[in-house]
Image (tube, rainbow, N blue to C red):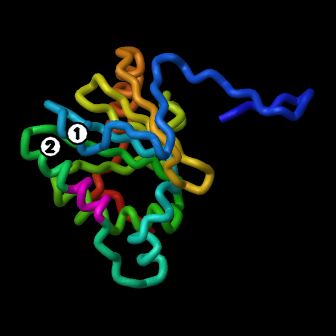
Amino acid sequence: MGATSAASGASQQRTIPARLRTYGRGESKPSFAELIGECASSAFHLEIHDWHITDDPRFLAWKEGRRQPEVPAGRAFQEAVQDAVARGVQVHRVRLVSEPVNEYVRWEHSITTEHNLAIGEAVRWLPRAFASTLTLPGNPFWVFDGRLVRFSIFDGNGSVVGHQFSESPEVASLCSAAFEAAWDLATDHEDYTLD
């Protein structure tokens, strides 16, 4: 997260905007279950990377043609979303993807019905070619009740290395508008087929 100085070759730490609170991988931060557990109306998620959480044991098993194992984090996510949906919270997700899709997106598509739709989450897919005129934040995010944003920070290999949080009305408005614009252009999971 630094910029390289052409003159010295040294790395300079850039200042993160004050509207964000950044947590590293090992730091204690609000969990997804806590965040969605406090939701009253909506939780919207925009995924913008073609590769993420590539060390997921289910993905690795799928790649090798093995049965996908039960993963505690996956089950905890499902239970948290199910509880929220039962309380009347709308949970929506848009996956922005390059086409033709890579193997990770193909795997995500294959599990969406049982992992996401079955628990009450609505999922849409947006081919990257249709997103050129959208104004989108630089990192994937969740917006909770239109007021709290959690950004996920990934490394170049698709592993989560930290999260940033903001309750700034400007940041929440930016992300909410970006999500709605993407949602309007995206295709429902049931209608998005892979070649």
On the question of residue 129 being in view, the answer is no
Q: What amino acid is at disc 2?
A: Ala
Q: Height in image: 16 above or below 39?
A: above
The residue sitting at 49% across, 64% down in the picture is 55
Q: Please, is residue 45 above or below residue 176 in the view?
A: below
| Rendered position, 53 above or below 126 | below
Residue corresponding to mark 2 = 84
Q: Position of residue 54 (x, y in %)?
A: 50, 62
At label 1, counting other C-alpha atoms closer than 10 Å, the crowd grade (few under 14, some 14-19, many 20 or more) is many
Magenta part, dominant SS = helix
Label disc, if present, on residue 55 of the rendered structure: none
Q: How many marks?
A: 2
- The residue pinned by badge 1 equals 36
Is label 1 in contact with label 2 (beta carbons under 8 Å)?
A: yes
On whether residue 167 falls in the magenta region, the answer is no
Q: Amino acid at mark 1?
A: Ile
Residue 30 sits in which quadrant?
top left
Determine which quarter of the picture holds residue 67.
Answer: bottom left
In the rendered view, does 163 fall on the left or right side of 77?
right
Q: Is 75 inside the magenta-drawn segment?
A: yes
Front position in the image: 44 or 32? 32
Quadrant showing the C terminus: bottom left
The residue under the point 52% across, 46% down is: 161
Q: Which region shows up in magenta?
A: 72-78
Residue 107 can be seen, yes or no: yes
Task: Identify the image quadrant of the N terminus.
Answer: top right
Q: Position of residue 56 (x, y in %)?
A: 43, 65
Q: CA distance from mark 1 to mark 2?
A: 7 Å
Secondary structure, mark 1, is helix
Question: Which residue is rendered at x = 57% and y = 23% of the image?
Answer: 16
